[in-house]
Amino acid sequence: MNGIVAEQSEIERAGSKDARQCRLLSIVVPVFNESETLPEFHRRLSAVLDSMPYTAEVVYIDDGSEDGSAEFVRGLRDSDPRVALIQLSRNFGKEAAMTAGLDHATGDAVVVIDADLQDPPEVIPELVAPWVEGKGEVVYAQRRSRAGETWLKRASAHTFYKLMERVGRAPMPRNVGDFRLLSRAAVADLVRLREQHRFMKGLFAWIGHRQISVPYDRDPRHAGSSKWNYIKLWSFSIEGITSFTTAPLKVATYVGLLVAVLALVFGLGIIYETLVYGSDVPGYPSLMVVVLFLGGVQLTTIGILGEYVGRISDETKRRPLYLVQDHLPAESVPPSDKPSGKAARTR
Ligand code: UDP
Ligand code: MG
């Protein structure tokens, strides 16, 4: 009896080994003005893909580049059948570009990676291994350290993660970017989330599934400059907070209540003072303080409300998240492997 079971699992193992060979791996690369790094990026990525036993496609999403990045990718397709290009009609932002990539990727697993070589392509096999072994549906690369970043960036990132941990509903791992592998099932769930304000790190966490981390060292940018500045990072964190929690609305309510109670106590104090000592000094300073303070609290509260109302208005328009100007699929992918991609495209 045991012998038969052992024999069966032997056959299964052999079978799954074959299945591994025909697995399709998609690499999704959002690209915005990266013509300086793309040649080196593709060279390193190709070397990694060549060393792996899977069919692969590399989906470059040109997010409205103005430096000829799209033309470069078009050229790559002549020499590399794995290359696919999705050209968006303008710059929609990295989150939308990644979504476009996930919608069009056809692989059994999809790896999202930056084009600037900050995420080393050499880490990809380490992300694929746990998935092949069936250990998890999401394998994310976790930065060992944030060395090389300014203290201000590190401090603000720290505060943001602390805040998100407190108020967010889905736990969000720290020092994790978008560099990760998602199984077909995880991608299918992720592309169902069509909100306009896409805070991908939050969405990645929200879908759940078994998620595991692989430590890596993030390299400096190969060339060009980061598309992020502090203003963008600030609105990015507002995005993160407002799309995953309504707690700030509660804070506004409580601060308002507290101020009202304090104002009441203060008012009673003034009445008492006037009754007992009489009023010989007009209360101009105290009045100004109260008026300005309450005005400030009211404006903040309205501002917080406005953030949410603005988001409601954006969501109700139900606009597509991105528009595709041109789509050139990879030749390495057999047509029969494309139904999942097609299903995603119709959405
Ligand atoms: N990116 C994009 N659209 C944008 C901004 C950036 O597709 O509007 C791409 C960019 O080409 C790169 C990745 O997103 O591949 C990360 O961008 P960046 O290096 O500027 O971000 P950082 O590494 O500083 O977070
Ligand atoms: Mg970068």
Image (cartoon, rainbow, N blue to C red):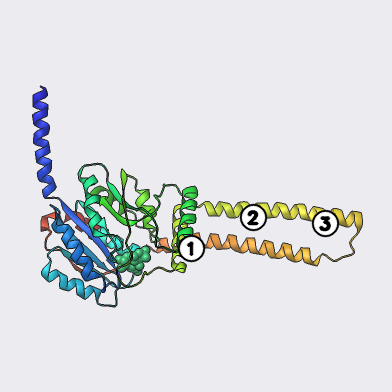
Q: Mark 2 to mark 3: distance in Å? A: 21 Å
The mark closer to the camera, 2 or 1, is 1
Tell me the kind of residue under disc 1. Leu
Task: Report the residue at 32% width, 56% height from top.
Answer: 217
Task: Report the residue at 17% width, 62% height from top.
Answer: 46
Mark 2 sits near ligand 1, with its Cβ under 8 Å away: no
Circle 3 residue? 270
Secondary structure under tag 1 reads: helix
Give the quarter of the figure containing the N terminus.
top left
Tell me the kind of residue under disc 3. Ile
Secondary structure under tag 3 reads: helix
Q: Residue 326: percent from the left, percent from the top?
A: 21, 71
Neighbour tally class for label 3: few under 14, some 14-19, many 20 plus, Cα within 10 Å = some
Q: Do residues under tags 2 and 3 come within 8 Å of each other at their CB atoms?
A: no
Does the image show residue 183? no
Looking at the image, tell me whether mark 3 or mark 1 is earlier in sequence order.
1
The circle on residue 256 is 2
Task: Report the residue at 33% width, 57% height from top.
Answer: 178
Neighbour tally class for label 2: few under 14, some 14-19, many 20 plus, Cα within 10 Å = some
Tell me the kind of residue under disc 2. Gly
The mark closer to the camera, 3 or 1, is 1
- Front residue (pair 316, 332): 332
User: Where 327 sits versus 335, above or below?
Assistant: below
Q: Mark 2 to mark 1: distance in Å? A: 31 Å
